[in-house]
Amino acid sequence: MDREERTVKVKARASSGLSGFFVPHITGSLETTGAAGGGLGIDSTITVEISLEALDRSQGSVALLNIINGVEVNSCLARYIVEKILSISEEKSNRIIIKQSISVPIGGGYGTSGGSAVAISFALAKALNVPLDFYTITEIAHEADIVCKTGLGTVVGIVKPCNGITIVRKPGGPRYAEIMCIPIDDSLLALTAFYKPIPKNTILTNLEDLEKVRAIGLETLRKIELNPTPETFIDNCYRFAIDSKIMTPTVRNTIELLNKVEGVIGASMNMIGEALFALIDKNVVDNAVEAVMTTDPKWIYIWRPGNNGIDIEVIKHSETT
């Protein structure tokens, strides 16, 4: 008896989104829930390769394997996205293998969950040939980030290209969010240093904390919108981290060292992780790195802030009978 076999491989690349401040916005709808805020894109730091292999009916309908940096992970994000897109797809019998390569620290306030959600959603929709438009695919990624409690507004900032600082002025999903891009001069680079992850549930433990952060975040956004420059952004991110009491002693100490280096525009803490980011003159990179290295970070990176959206590539498509 003839047996049909089908193998599809699709690769997607997305940015991670380092957050400098946020304004939680919780509603009764996943479409309108989100966060205003702002941060820096780190381009092409998340690569997802999805392989679809046809299953015999005796093997069941769907088998899912999710691997992050070589380690199998039971991921709420991956499960949610797969179930959502499969509910629309006509193809039901597939072994789905998701291989993720993430080149920034996970849990450090770099928006890896949002970036993964974007890359998985677009790659899977392409692999399954599901006729969904850009906004619908992005909405699935946005929903997954919220349902799995891994983020609020990261997805909408990642999918919109910006060669500079991304500001989410109006929160919500992709059909509701409003994005502004603050250009960064060619003379500036960004530096980040990571120390350790911070679980989000240890920071915002009750509604009162959330409301305080929301009020501080709204004032931060207002000041940045009045004068949208890199200097205003980084200064107000620092004020946000201090006033919200999220800033850790380790990060504050490193920022004080960095601010003594001539040519450092400013620095603040990643939201949320024990990590920092700074805007620096490209001519003082070595001096800035030297100052940070005295505090023994686990990871340090220099880059030109921005992101180019999502890139999708079909790398294999074969069918035999």
Image (cartoon, helix red, strand yellow):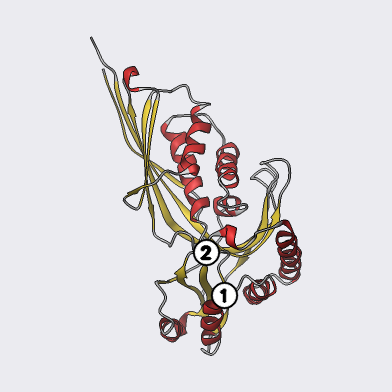
Residue 170 seen from this side? no
Residue 316 seen from this side? yes
The residue located at (42%, 62%) in the rendering is: 104
Circle 1: element type: loop
Does 224 sit above or below residue 204? below
Tag 1–tag 2 contact (CB < 8 Å): yes
The residue located at (66%, 41%) in the rendering is: 30
| Lower position in the chain sequence, tag 1 or tag 2 | 2
**Is 98 displayed left or right of 254 in the figure?**
left
Q: Quadrant of the N terminus?
A: top left
Q: Quadrant of the C terminus?
A: top left
Could you tell me residue 128's position as x and y percent? 43, 30
Question: Dot 1 corresponds to which residue?
Answer: 248
Viewer-nearest residue: 58 or 115 = 58
Does 4 sit above or below residue 108? above
**Is 66 displayed left or right of 205 in the figure?**
left
Could you tell me residue 310's position as x and y percent? 48, 48
Question: Dot 2 corresponds to which residue?
Answer: 198
Q: Quadrant of residue 185 in the image?
A: bottom right
